[in-house]
Amino acid sequence: STIVERAREGGVLKAIHDAYGTPTSAKDLAARLRELALRDLPGIYHVVNSGPGASYEEIVRAALEDARLDADVEVVSMDSLSRPAPRPKNSRLKCLLSEAIGLPPVRHWREALKEFVSAESQAGAAIRR
């Protein structure tokens, strides 16, 4: 939501090209947590949307594409940012145990992002009216 909001405001977006994560939809996370709770099995489960993950630059560009927005994107390295706490360059996760207990993969992060950006765009349009 921040990416789309800043792009609409005309701000320059900083996008990290050398750090990776797996975007995860809160809606998909909640649904999977419910499924896991109903199974009542022990264990630690990583719940993320499927797909190989992406750099934060790729996520920014995908969100802009989905929102049909053009914005200035400044590509930066993770080391160039002054962050208060260290962050890993690779924080991609995969749902291994969920699939092992017979749950289908969570949908791909691109599909979830498209749905989220569409909903955010509609909500933003309603507010701007």
Image (spheres, rainbow, N blue to C red):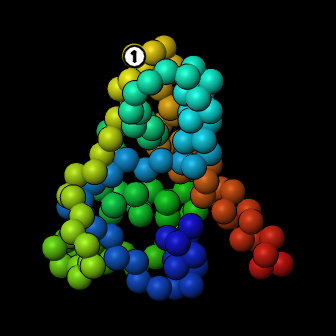
Q: Secondary structure at mark 1?
A: helix
Q: Position of residue 87 (x, y in %)?
A: 24, 64
In the rendered image, which residue does mark 1 sit on?
Answer: 100
Q: In the image, 119: left or right of 6?
A: right
- Is 13 drawn above or below residue 109 in the view shown? below
Question: Can you give x and y, in whole percent of width and height, for residue 52 in the image?
Answer: 32, 39
Corner quadrant of residue 125: bottom right
Q: Is residue 60 left or right of residue 118?
A: left
- Find residue 96 and report its image quarter: top left
Residue 19 versus residue 95 in the image, above or below: below
Q: Please state, as top left, top right, bottom left or bottom right, where the C terminus lies in the image.
A: bottom right
Identity of the residue drawn at 39% across and 33% down: 44
Can residue 10 be seen in this snapshot?
yes
Q: Residue furthest right?
A: 129
* In this rendering, position of residue 87 left or right of residue 104: left
Question: What residue is shown at x 33% (from left), y 61% (from top)?
Answer: 56
How many numbered badges does the structure rendering display? 1
Which residue lies at the image location 45% right of the left edge and 38% below the top edge? 47
Residue 28 seen in the figure? no
Residue under the point 49% across and 21% down: 41
Front in this rendered view, residue 100 or 58: 100
Amino acid at the residue labelled 1: Ala
Compare residues 83 and 62 and report the one nearer the observer: 83
> Residue 76: x and y, percent?
23, 74
Where is residue 103 drawn, in percent x and y? 51, 19
